[in-house]
Image: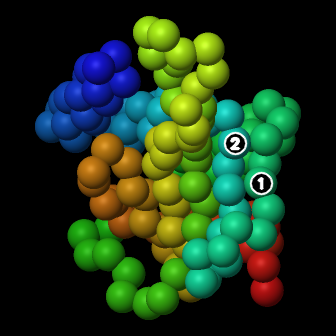
Amino acid sequence: MKKLCLGALLLCALLLCACQSTGNQEDQQAASYQEAMAKAQAIQIQDAAGQTVDTLSQPEEIETFLEELDLGHWTYQEAAPQAQPLGTFVFIEESTIKLGQTEPDGWMEICRILCYPEDTITLEILGLSLPFTLEEAAWETLAARLPA
């Protein structure tokens, strides 16, 4: 219930940011995405077939990865890419311990980033699928983490 409320609150924040007409709209959206992604306790790196090939689980690795994303320079696209994804980054966290439990009962997905050719990605978060174009350096950094 707590996670559902938090998710609803984050969705409202995303929608409000999208509706504002201030000059800092991209910065506000990037900050809300960054806040959600920063909760990740692990990031699974999956190949084009959806098989996990690596996992970032150290806080320093995750922080570095988030910095490499350069969210402040993502450009929203009107249409989602039509190509097959080259790979996916899945942000996960341990489920909340509920009353009567002593251990969490698994992992919960926060969001995922699907990487496509030509500097494009799709961010899937809170039931939304948002296509973006990245600056070349950020996209190359992501692509370098994917299996060849």
**Circle 1/circle 2 CB separation < 8 Å:** yes
Q: Which residue is mark 1?
A: 55
Residue 14, percent across and down?
28, 35
Residue 135 versus residue 6 in the image, above or below = below
Q: Quadrant of the C terminus?
A: bottom right
Residue 47, percent across and down?
67, 77
User: How far apart are labels 1 and 2 at the CA level?
Assistant: 7 Å
Residue 88, located in which quarter of the rendered image?
A: bottom right
Comes first in the chain, label 1 or label 2? 2
Q: Amino acid at mark 2?
A: Ala
Q: Which mark is residue 42?
A: 2
Residue 102, located in which quarter of the rendered image?
A: top right
Residue 123 versus residue 27 in the image, above or below = below
Going by the picture, which residue comes out furthest to the front? 100
Quick one: SS at disc 2? strand
Q: In this rendering, does residue 123 appear at all?
A: yes
Give the residue drawn at x 32%, y 75%.
80
Quick check: 98 left or right of 49? left
Q: Residues within 10 Å of mark 2 (few under 14, many from 20)?
A: many
